[in-house]
Amino acid sequence: MTAAFHEVLFPLDIALRSAGGPERRTEIVTFGSGREERNARWAHSRRRFDAGYGVKTFDALQTVVAFFEERRGQLHSFRWRDRLDHSSAQPSSAITPFDQVIGTGDGVRTQFQLTKSYGGAYAVYQRPVVKPVGGSVRVAVSGVEFEDGEAFICDPITGLVTFLEGHVPSVGVSVTAGFLFDVPVRFDTEYLEVDLSAFEAGAIPKIPLVEIKP
């Protein structure tokens, strides 16, 4: 069976009570003087999560087992909602079409990848967003919001915004967007070990997930 991406969201009530965050890989060489040379091995961070923290009932546990079986363990990947970071907007704010700059028009370019920027004072990190939530994407050009389906379309599988004929951004104008998004992940284990006697006593099963690059 060939691996595939399943456009299905991991059970949301479990995901929103789980743990996890971004991981980076840095190569560090220490010289005899004590000085260091540091190089980033990954251009983009990779997120890891543990869904076990969100499993509080037998019903939830059975739901996860069924989800795991349908994904065939690590074979098929899927969507995950990161409670900490799933919106283009500032914390506790509603999304607007001006949240993120995703490019500058040149009068010819019709496609722009959704991205989210982090930081701003030293070395801004721009994260590609490939799994936007369908219907959540709002786009503006030069401060004016465009109508979804009339001026542009956004692919919820790739996060690619395509401007339609007659609405291509002109030279030098800023293209901005606001959106909700999911993280593409897979299970990071082939074996779900569940001790039911320990579970009754309050133990949390380990259900590791890792972000993929689709």
Image (tube, grey):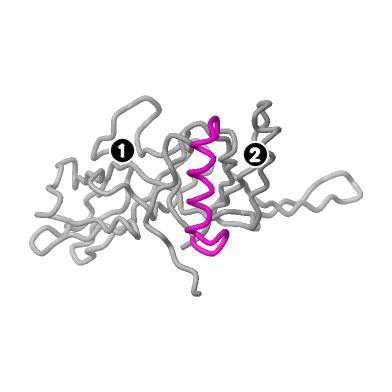
The amino acid on which the numbered mark 1 sits, given as a three-letter code, is: Asp
**Which element is circle 2 on?**
loop
In the image, residue 76 above or below residue 59: below
What is the C-alpha distance between the residues marked 1 and 2? 38 Å
Residue drawn 38% across the image and 30% down it? 90
Q: Residues within 10 Å of mark 1 (few under 14, many from 20)?
A: many
- Judge whether residue 56 is colored magenta: yes
Q: Position of residue 72 (x, y in %)?
A: 53, 62
Q: Does the rendering let one see residue 197?
A: yes
Q: Is residue 205 left or right of residue 160?
A: right
- Magenta extent: 54-76
Kindly indicate whether the residue at mark 2 contacts the one at mark 1 (C-beta within 8 angstroms): no
Q: Residue furthest bottom?
A: 1
| Residue highlighted by disc 2 | 205
Q: Main secondary structure of the magenta part?
A: helix
Of 2 and 49, nearer the camera is 2
Q: Nearer the viewer, residue 199 or 148?
A: 199
Residue ID at (48%, 38%): 15
In the displayed orientation, state which residue is furthest to the front. Answer: 197
Q: Position of residue 213 (x, y in %)?
A: 50, 60
Q: Please tell me which residue is depicted at 53% across the width and 31% down the height of the picture.
A: 57
Mark yes or no: residue 120 visible: no
Q: Indicate the secondary structure of the residue bearing disc 1.
A: loop
Asked whether residue 71 is drawn in magenta, I would say yes
Mark carried by residue 99: 1
84 is higher (above) or lower (below) than 136: above
